[in-house]
Amino acid sequence: MSDETGNVDQDAMADDWGAAMAEQVGDAGGGDADWGDALAEQATSEAAQKVELDELTDDAALIKDPKLDVILDIPVTISMQVGHAEIPIRNLLQLNQGSVIELDRVAGEPLDVKVNGTLVAHGEVVVVNDRYGIRLTDVISPEERIEKLR
């Protein structure tokens, strides 16, 4: 493409491009007929097959399914949320021992029980053997949890 002086021969380059373009157009000569043949071949191929899926059953039956044994031992984080508050950084920096932060909940209102950040139940605080615990008062159904994800 270049001569002895290193200059690019523009005419030779244009001829090469022209030849490549003509070859490409010549290969696509069939046009829509080639596409139609390819689509028909793909439709009759065995690449896509119908798959049978298991019917959904009760949650209790799912837990006994050996396929789920793999995930049953995965640890999750469960947390209880008493309430929350938004305060400016100025007020946050002024907090010290004995400070009181007002939460968005009324005394006696149930706590939120969250698993990995997803609300799964409501409950109340109890003391068991000098330790805090939570008694679940309302468990959110799996259907409701899935709806909240959508």
Image (spheres, rainbow, N blue to C red):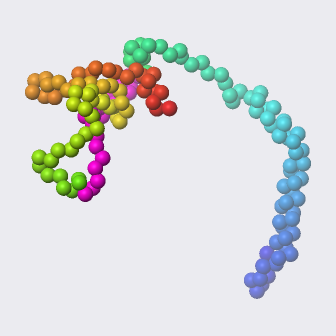
Residue 144 place in picture, x, y as percent: 44, 24
Image check: 71 left or right of 7? left
What residue occupies the far left of the structure in this picture?
A: 130
Q: Is residue 41 visible?
A: yes
What residue occupies the far bottom of the structure in this picture?
A: 5
**Residue 53 higher or lower than 37, as above or below:** above
Instruction: Specify whether residue 81 is painted magenta.
Output: yes
Magenta range is 68-90
| Viewer-nearest residue: 85 or 44 | 85
Residue at horizontal 38 percent and vertical 27 percent from the top: 71
**Residue 90 higher or lower than 81, as above or below:** below
Quarter of the figure with the N terminus: bottom right
**Residue 38 higher or lower than 28, as above or below:** above
Residue at horizontal 13 percent and vertical 28 percent from the top: 131
Image check: 8 left or right of 150? right
Residue at horizontal 23 percent and vertical 25 percent from the top: 124
| Viewer-nearest residue: 38 or 64 | 64
How many marks overall?
0
Instruction: Specify whether residue 74 is painted magenta.
Output: yes
Residue 132 place in picture, x, y as percent: 16, 28
Residue 53 place in picture, x, y as percent: 57, 19
- Tell me where residue 113 sits by quadrant: top left
Residue at horizontal 21 percent and vertical 44 percent from the top: 101
Image check: 11 left or right of 99? right
- Tell me where residue 40 sits by quadrant: top right
Residue 137 place in picture, x, y as percent: 28, 20
Q: Is residue 75 visible?
A: no
